[in-house]
Amino acid sequence: MFTDKMILRIPGPTPIPPRVQQAMNQPMIGHRSGQFSSLFARTAERLKTYFGTKQDVYILAGSGTSALEMSVVNTLQPNDEAAVLVSGAFGERFAKICERFGIVVHRLDVPWGEAVTPDILTDFLREKPRVKAVFATYCETSTGVLNPIRELAQVVRETSDALFIVDAVSCLGAVACEMDDWGIDILVTGSQKAFMLPTGLAFIAASERAWKVIEEQKPLAFYLDLKAYRKSLAEKTTPYTPAVSLIFGLEEVCNMLEEEGLPQIIRRHELMRDMTRAGMRALNIPLMTADAYASPTVTSLDPKGAFDAEELRKVLRTKFNLVIAGGQQHLKGKIFRIGHMGYCEPLDVIQIISAIEMALHQIGVGVELGAGVKAAQEVLVSHV
């Protein structure tokens, strides 16, 4: 094997297209120059399509978590009440951020692997009339669940006056999202998932309704003051030093996304999801999520003791240079997760499933070589 030829199939960071790498290798420019201002303004404008908004999209130097925290510290104050929908590790993160700033958190917990449904949320919010914000995770990376955000947004609107704030870090740019039409008040994502960039940029947009709240708040942070970013974007710049090379890369990402077109991008990710699930079913590996709530960007599998998930991952890594993800928190060592987003296409899924078949064979699992590949191929040819 070529030791430098690693096949990265985790749910982020994801592989970077060569043309994006090349764009990031451009000579450095001044971050307060006219050249950068032009670059920054046009890339921020182009992100609106993927958010489904006419509102400005703000770009900050930081991971997706920085924008999650930004959504909290600009909308709430200590002792305010918030509802956090927890269906996995990243719903947990939203709750921890709120708690760190002295916010009273009402958790709506569902079992990992299940989605938060509108009926559950309706009953929950009716019992929490003082909630000022509802925090939800669109794609719960730890389980592969895609929560029904459109329907949840409708419930929030109908049952409360709370802001609806959504973490879309591991799916935006790969799934349908209509922030304005669905009634999402703040939407957050990051660069290292479907946007095919290294970690280091976070993106956030706020509705007019959210801005009315933000304008009345004294933010609980300095660097993450969203009003400062709004003032700077009006001047085509950032309040603090931007990640210039990543912005070069972001422009090339926008070129790639526009060349393919969002409808086709969504179909490609749904196809890769369906191929992966068909292949795993053919190998008798239990899926963690129901089809109705399965994410197009990451699939989680639970062997349920039939084999050691960590042993499988080790063989894939050492024998085939293929890296997939393990479980998080109480699922660590028990499950494995396959990322299929961003710079990934259906033939890559065939490669992943083939490698998993061979690795299972090597660790003594009685699988029929080619069974999973055949099932995935049948899904693919039906779409070609």
Image (cartoon, grey):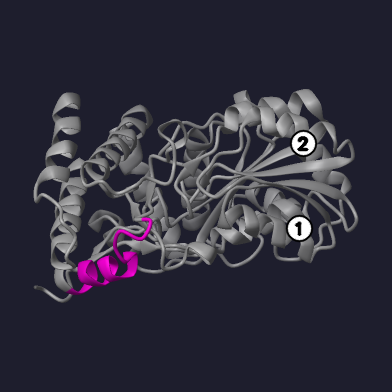
Image quarter hosting the N terminus: bottom left
The spot of residue 304 in percent (x, y) is 38, 56
- Label 1 sits on residue: 98
Residue at the image position 51 percent from the left and 51 percent from the top: 40
Residue at the image position 12 percent from the left and 39 percent from the top: 374
The spot of residue 108 in percent (x, y) is 71, 45
- Label 2 sits on residue: 124
Q: Which circle's residue, 1 or 2, is located before the other in the chain?
A: 1
Residue at the image position 21 percent from the left and 41 percent from the top: 282
Q: Name the secondary structure under disc 2.
A: helix
Residue type at numbered disc 2: Phe
Residue type at numbered disc 1: Cys
Q: Is residue 255 left or right of residue 229?
A: left
Q: Main secondary structure of the magenta part?
A: helix
Q: Nearer the viewer, residue 142 or 175?
A: 142
Q: What stretch is highlighted in magenta?
A: 304-318
